[in-house]
Amino acid sequence: MHSTATRRRECDEPASRAGDPMSDDDATPGVTGTPRLLLRLEGAALAAGALILYPFTGGTWLLFGLLVLAPDLGMLGYLAGPRIGALGYNAVHMTVGPIALALIGLSTSSYPAIAVALIWLVHIGADRALGYGLKYADGFGATHLGRAGRAAGR
């Protein structure tokens, strides 16, 4: 139990990531415990739901196979450093993009757009289910779902 004075001092101390909302440090770890499990299950449900709906778009499995890993091209930003890498990765791993594309496809009766949106959602959901969340600028393994990949072993 911390005293009030200790809590005030901790709040007044500047964070090591001051001014960088995409950074992560030990004071602000990713989600843990049951909420992390629930977020991963939510990702699995997203991937499964999008996968079940995909055949109804008329999209081919060849198209699916060609595009399912396309969002990972966002990782190329890591060649320019972790901050640019996190921005690039997060830009194509948020559900906003595929949901917007799906809505455009639905409003224009464009089944190819809906198919691409569902493929994109399968990818995002699978990543979340595997524990790969949105990235912090600290490096690829620092995610909103906690440490991932090789960083998880630390």
Image (cartoon, grey):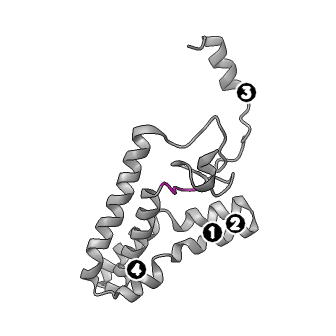
- Sooner in the amino-acid sequence: mark 3 or mark 2: 3
Q: Secondary structure at mark 3?
A: loop
Residue 2 x/y as whole percent: 59, 14
Q: Is residue 129 left or right of residue 152?
A: left
- Sooner in the amino-acid sequence: mark 3 or mark 1: 3
| Between marks 4 and 2 in the image, the one whose residue lies nearer the viewer | 2
Mark 3–mark 1 distance (CA, rounded to whole Å): 34 Å
- Sooner in the amino-acid sequence: mark 4 or mark 3: 3
Q: Quadrant of the C terminus?
A: top right
Q: Secondary structure at mark 1?
A: helix
- Sooner in the amino-acid sequence: mark 4 or mark 1: 1
- Sooner in the amino-acid sequence: mark 4 or mark 2: 2
Q: Which residues are magenta?
A: 131-135
* Marking on residue 13: 3
The residue to which callout 4 is attached is 116
Residue 135 x/y as whole percent: 59, 56
User: Is residue 132 in the magenta section?
Assistant: yes
Residue type at mark 1?
Met
Q: Residues within 10 Å of mark 4 (few under 14, many from 20)?
A: many
The residue to which callout 1 is attached is 75
Residue 1, by quadrant, is top right
Residue at 75%, 68% (x, y): give it.
80
Mark 4–mark 1 distance (CA, rounded to whole Å): 19 Å
**Nearer to us in this view, 102 or 142:** 142
Residue type at mark 3?
Glu
Residue 138 x/y as whole percent: 69, 51
* Marking on residue 78: 2
Mark 3 in CB contact with mark 1 (< 8 angstroms):
no
Residue 95 appears in the rendering: no
| Between marks 3 and 1 in the image, the one whose residue lies nearer the viewer | 1
Q: Mainly helix, strand or loop, the magenta region?
A: loop
